[in-house]
Amino acid sequence: MNTAAPTMELDRPAARPAQLVDPFARAITYLRVSVTDRCDFRCVYCMSEHMSFLPKADLLTLEELDRLCSAFVAKGVRKLRMTGGEPLVRRGIMTLFRSLSRHLKSGALDELTVTTNGSQLVKYAAELRDCGVERINVSLDTLDPDKFRSITRWGELDKVIAGIDAAQAAGLKIKINAVALKGVNEDELAGLVSWAHGRGMDLTIIEVMPLGDIGDDRLGQYLPLSMVRARLSERFTMQDIDHRTGGPARYVRIAETGGRLGFITPMTHNFCESCNRVRITCTGTLYMCLGQEDAADLRAPLRSSESDEPLYAAIDAAIAHKPKGHDFVIDRRHKRPALSRHMSVTGG
Ligand code: SAM
Ligand code: SF4
């Protein structure tokens, strides 16, 4: 019989911080990180033409972003998505991808990814792939160069298409995100499905959300996806599939193309019960819900100590207040956004 003293203390791996479970028993495993509020486009549904951006000094440094992401990984986050603003315009951004890729190598992280407008992909696609990024989201609402220019105000379609080519050549899988805009691209959505699926890319259509003052009338842009879906079903055969990401998208398979089509309908559907995600801004503010104002500052605990303990405590306290859900409304009387912050603050 083995009479040796129990060796549990010795055998136990280094203590890991408690994992993140919110008051509604949802495990938080997905962090979206807005690495900058700046962008080289000014999409009409996202920004006003003359945006004022944060002073650069307010931003977390790339090292701080790394530490913050790594704290969430230690607390059980398995997927990190870099977004913005346009994440790939942040100077030195590849050092952050390179550094975070260590969590992929260690097995602590399942996925490191990015949502981008595609303008910088010619430059960065191969390096992203080399950092372990496998799939990316590219936002593209139209294939018409003039319309593209009027939606993005500053963007060039050719550059984005070249970026998509470069990303596919580098071996990145792509999902296209298109915002459905009344009277702007509604006639093109079937064409976008055929184009995306023809190139082996999934497509997700997004309903416009009332975030931030864009100096325009939201009601004019709003196109319910129930209508989009009804029109697409005249042309395509849609088969419901059970592909779930814990997020707001619901997916169908298009029989004619074999490709996957997603619908994100925050205005007409409730997807909160399966929510597994939180969002952090480039100044270190943690938003527990895209559709609520509840937020917690993580920059102060991050900067207060070299130890991560104050940060872990602040993250735990914040997750304990994750709201059950949201209720977006485009206010028909006042035409005001439901939330004052822009999508480019939390990155969608
Ligand atoms: N710049 C990157 C891009 O465009 O992909 C990342 C940030 S952008 C804020 C993330 C996503 O949010 C994009 O797919 C964009 O189309 C979407 N978006 C921005 N404003 C929106 C709004 N008011 N309603 C719905 N989607 C919006
Ligand atoms: Fe920039 Fe993306 Fe917003 Fe367009 S949607 S203005 S590309 S952050």
Image (cartoon, rainbow, N blue to C red):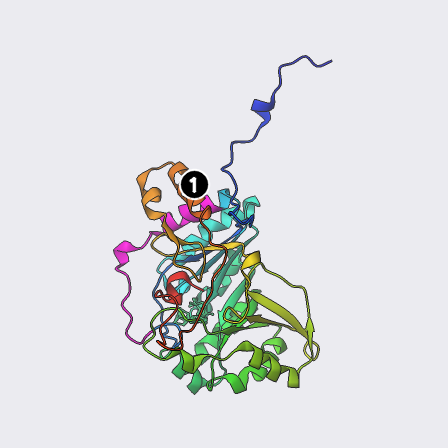
Name the side, left or right, on which 242 lies relative to 107: right
- The residue carrying pointer 1 sits among few (fewer than 14), some (14 to 19) or many (20 or more) residues within 10 Å by Cα, namely many
Mark 1 vs ligand 1: CB below 8 Å: no
Q: Quadrant of residue 12?
A: top right
User: Circle 1 — which element?
Assistant: helix
Is 102 or 252 nearer to us in this picture?
A: 252
131, above or below 162, in the image: above
Give the labeled residue for mark 1.
Answer: 312
- The residue that appears at 65% across and 82% down in the rendered structure is 233
| Residue 68: % across, % down | 41, 47
Q: Is residue 70 magenta?
A: yes
Q: Is residue 314 magenta?
A: no
| Residue 296: % across, % down | 37, 50
Q: Quadrant of residue 239?
A: bottom right
**As drawn, which residue projects farthest toward the right?**
1
Is 235 or 89 nearer to us in this picture?
A: 235
Figure quarter occupied by ligand 2: bottom left
The kind of residue tagged 1 is Tyr
| Residue 94: % across, % down | 42, 57
Q: Which residues are magenta?
A: 48-72
**Which image quarter holds the C terminus?**
bottom left
71, above or below 89, in the image: above
**Which image quarter holds the N terminus?**
top right
- The residue that appears at 70% across and 14% down in the rendered structure is 2
Is 252 or 25 nearer to us in this picture?
A: 25
- The residue that appears at 33% across and 37% down in the rendered structure is 305
Name the side, left or right, on which 8 lies relative to 141: right
- The residue that appears at 43% across and 40% down in the rendered structure is 312
